[in-house]
Image (cartoon, helix red, strand yellow):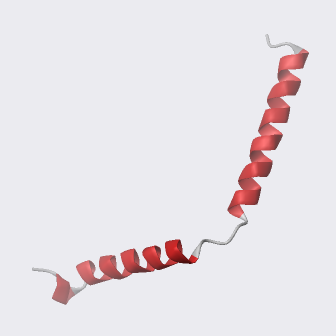
Amino acid sequence: MASKKTDQLDRQIDENLRRVYMNAASEPVPDRFAKLLEQLRQREADTNSPKGQS
């Protein structure tokens, strides 16, 4: 059985991790990552298109 102090510390850690995650998740995706994602989507579309298949 965990002590009251340990439970309180665990809750505080959980709250801080959630706060950090929410801050990071709300930040915009950097342009270079957005461009890379678009290139990957295009490459995947080209690979899955009838003319891209061998």
Corner quadrant of residue 26: bottom right
The percent coordinates of residue 19 (x first, y second) are 80, 50
Q: Quadrant of residue 16?
A: top right
Image point (79%, 34%), residue name:
13
Number of marks present in the image shown: 0
Farthest residue, direction left: 54
- Counting from the top left corner in percent of width and height, residue 17 is at 75, 43
Drawn side of residue 50 relative to residue 9, left or right: left
Residue reaching furthest to the bottom: 51
In the rendered view of the protein, which quadrant contains the C terminus? bottom left
Q: Is residue 26 left or right of residue 29?
A: right
36 vs 21, left or right, is left
Answer above or below: position of 9 versus 14.
Answer: above
In which quadrant of the rendered view does residue 50 lie?
bottom left
Name which residue lies at 56% across and 78% down: 31
Q: Quadrant of the N terminus?
A: top right
Question: Where residue 30 sits: x, y (%)?
Answer: 59, 72
Which is more toward the observer, 37 or 50? 37
Identify the residue at horizontal 76%, vertical 58% (top origin). Answer: 23
Vertical side of 26 occupied by 51: above or below: below
Q: Is residue 53 left or right of residue 7?
A: left
Picture residue at 44% right of the left edge, 80% below the top: 38
